[in-house]
Amino acid sequence: MNKRAYDLVWGTTLRTTTRLHRVVQKVSGGRIWTKFPGGGQVVWITTLGRKSGEWRTTPLLAVRDGDAWVVTGSNAGQAKVPGWVFNARDHADGWVQVGRQTWTARFEEVHGEQRDALYDRLTKIWGSYKMYADNAGRYIPVFRVIPLAPTRSSGR
């Protein structure tokens, strides 16, 4: 599949899944669809829009790393870097929600060997990350989302 077709198919799939996930999250109050097929944890990160100044919430597949969660800006292997990555780079503070619990959080981009090791851990819970890396044609950023303080139990 050529790159343009790949981005069209996976971009449409990702947008549709994200919209559906938002509806399920809202209706269930964060009780349903908290795990990805294969058992990976879904976390919701909220970042401050670097251009809009508005808070943006995004569901992402994550793996634990001590007290932190590891997420990646794979964008399903599309050429375009997801907007939340730029937001997290510009404003390192936001929120993370896991299930029904929300914490203030700090977003820390990791690089080098640590990035590679954490990305490898993500591929173990979602094998498609290998395909995403092959198809993206770009560096895929990895972030540790570090929970700081609990805020409330029913999400942002």
Image (cartoon, grey):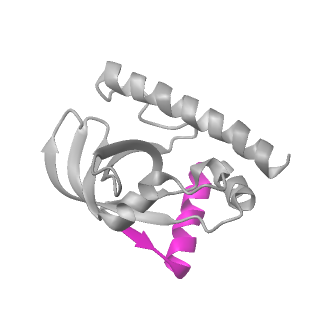
- What residue is shown at x 32% (from left), y 29% (from top)? 30
| Residue 150 belongs to magenta span | no
Residue occupying the far right of the picture: 1
Residue at the spot 63% in from the left edge and 33% down from the top edge? 13
Segment tinted magenta in the rendering: 108-127
Residue 107 in sight here: no
Question: Looking at the image, which residue is at 68% across and 60% down?
Answer: 133
The mark total stands at: 0
Q: Closest to the observer: 54 or 22?
A: 54
Secondary structure mostly seen in the magenta stretch? helix
Residue 91, quarter of the rendered image: bottom left
- Relative side of 64 to 16, left or right: left
Asked if 70 appears above or below 12 in the picture, the reply is below
Q: Is residue 145 visible?
A: yes
16 horizontally vs 86: left or right = right
Q: Nearer the viewer, residue 52 or 82?
A: 52
- Of residues 80 and 129, the one nearer the viewer is 80
Residue ranking furthest to the bottom: 112
The C terminus is located in which quarter? top left
Q: Residue at x 38, y 44 (%)?
A: 43
Give above or below for 27 relative to 138: above
Please give left or right for residue 154 compared with residue 120 in the image: left
Occupied quadrant, residue 37: top right
Give the image location of residue 23, x and y in percent: 41, 23
Compared with residue 134, is residue 5 higher up or lower down, i.e. above or below? above
Magenta stretch containing residue 111, yes or no?
Answer: yes
Horizontal and vertical percent for residue 11?
Answer: 64, 40
Of all residues shown, which one is farthest toward the top?
27
User: In which quadrant of the rendered view does residue 42 lie?
Assistant: top left
Spot occupied by residue 28 in the image (x, y as percentages of width and height): 33, 21
